Amino acid sequence: MKETVGGEARVAATPDSVKKLIALGATVLVETGAGLTSAQADEAYTIAGAKIVKDAATGAKECDILLCVQRPENSVLDKLQEGATVIGLLAPY
């Protein structure tokens, strides 16, 4: 998922971590431009085996696990399937 908090340059998954997840049998969806602030191009994710989706809300409909750094926007959370897991720092305070 592309981070939307201003100044956030981290990305929850790199092409290397995507390769590892795919090797474990996962299907990985990456939002277009998710890694740009971390110098990770969409093409690198595609080469790693990920499917690029146009936005986080579209991808959220299909995922069982959502990786993020900051808390996702409500529009993304509302699209998650019941029972989906969100993994990230989330900064609750």
Image (cartoon, grey):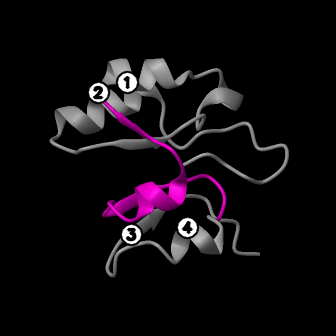
Asked if 42 appears above or below 80 in the picture, the reply is above
Numbered mark located on residue 38 in the image: none
Front of the two marks 3 and 2:
2
Which numbered disc, 3 or 4, marks the residue closer to the eye?
Answer: 4
Q: Earlier in the sequence, mark 1 or mark 3?
A: 1
Work out how far the residue at label 3 is from the one at label 2, CA to CA, in angstroms: 22 Å
User: What residue appears at the point 30 percent right and 64 percent down from the top-left corner?
Assistant: 64
Magenta segment, which residues?
A: 49-71
Give residue 66's position: percent from left, percent from top.
43, 59
Secondary element at tag 1: helix
Q: Amino acid at mark 3?
A: Thr
Are the residues at dot 1 and dot 3 in contact (C-beta closer than 8 Å)? no
Image point 59% across, 32% down: which residue? 35
Report, in whole angstroms, how far the alpha carbon at label 1 lies from the one at label 3.
23 Å
**Who's the residue at 65% across and 67% down the image?**
73
Tell which circle, 1 or 4, labels the residue nearer the N-terminal end. 1
Is the Cβ of the residue at disc 1 closer than 8 Å to that at disc 2?
Answer: yes
Residue 92 picture location, percent across and down: 69, 74
Residue 9's image quarter? top right
Amino acid type shown at disc 2: Gly
- Name the N-terminal-most of marks 3 and 2: 2
- The mark that comes first in sequence, 3 or 4, is 4
Decide: marks 1, 4 in contact (CB < 8 A)?
Answer: no
| Residue corresponding to mark 4 | 76
Give the side of residue 65 with respect to residue 92, left or right: left
